[in-house]
Image: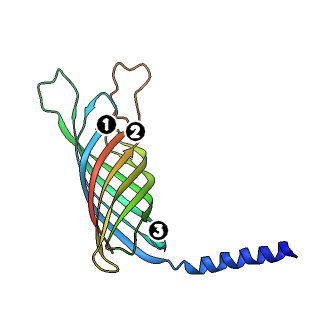
């Protein structure tokens, strides 16, 4: 009897907590800049400029989950020491991701947050599909109940091909590592 009663109490507590979750729409839009670092021997890093957006729901106070897109333009130069020409070029980086973000003090005007993006994309250096991983830490400035500004520092990884066995040098970029500063809005 005691087990049945305790199971009933646990089930009621679960139902009560589930009904407290009232998902509401939330969207983010960001512009960012930073520095990209190819892991291979054949390219030197350069600036990266991008835009991202994610849309989803807030599941509980401060917890956001959603899906998004990230598109970036990354500049680089080829690392050929024997070339007399400027081999500067640019490449596209693209990702579709799932995002989770947690605001630590959601009811305050200024709230720190942590976020993580996981997904797949396109590494334009090697022209291959890639795994996308992007954690970030930052601060939210809530201007109204539904609208505010966000600023964060993030890291993005786009996996690449890597070095071929038996090749003299690595002619692929390998994984692309980006250190970024992001500014954006949430609505």
Rounded to the nearest angstrom, the CA distance separating label 2 from label 1 is 9 Å
Which part of the image, by quadrant, shows the N terminus? Answer: bottom right
* Above-or-below relation of 143 to 171: below
Q: Earlier in the sequence, mark 2 or mark 3?
A: 3
Query: Foreground: 153 or 37?
Result: 153
Q: To which residue does mark 3 refer?
A: 63
| Label pair 2/1, CB-CB below 8 angstroms | yes
Q: Which residue is mark 2?
A: 160
Which one is earlier in the sequence, the residue at label 1 or at label 3? 1
User: In the rendered view, would you say 98 is above or below 177?
Assistant: below
Q: Locate residue 173, reporting x and y percent.
A: 33, 34
Residue 22's place in the image compared with 44, above or below, is below
The residue that mark 1 highlights is: 38
User: Which marked residue is nearer to the observer: mark 2 or mark 1?
Assistant: 1
Quarter of the rendering occupied by the C terminus: bottom left
Check disc 3: other Cα within 10 Å, few if <14, some if 14-19, many if 20+.
Answer: some
Front: mark 1 or 3: 3
């Amino acid at each position: 009897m005691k087990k049945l009663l305790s199971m009933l109490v646990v089930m009621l507590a679960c139902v009560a907590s589930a009904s407290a979750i009232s998902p509401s729409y939330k969207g983010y839009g960001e512009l960012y800049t930073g520095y990209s670092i190819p892991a291979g021997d054949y390219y030197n890093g350069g600036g990266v400029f991008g835009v991202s957006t994610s849309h989803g729901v807030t599941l509980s106070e401060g917890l956001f989950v959603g899906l998004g897109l990230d598109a970036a333009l990354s500049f680089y130069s080829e690392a050929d020491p024997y070339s007399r020409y400027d081999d500067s070029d640019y490449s596209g980086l693209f990702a579709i991701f799932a995002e989770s973000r947690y605001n630590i003090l959601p009811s305050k005007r200024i709230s720190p947050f942590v976020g993580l993006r996981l997904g797949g994309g396109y590494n334009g250096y090697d022209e291959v599909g890639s795994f996308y991983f992007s954690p970030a830490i930052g601060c939210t400035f809530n201007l109204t109940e539904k609208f505010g500004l966000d600023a964060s520092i993030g890291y993005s990884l786009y996996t690449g091909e890597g070095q071929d066995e038996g090749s003299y040098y690595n002619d692929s970029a390998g994984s692309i590592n980006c250190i970024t500063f992001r500014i954006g809005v949430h609505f």
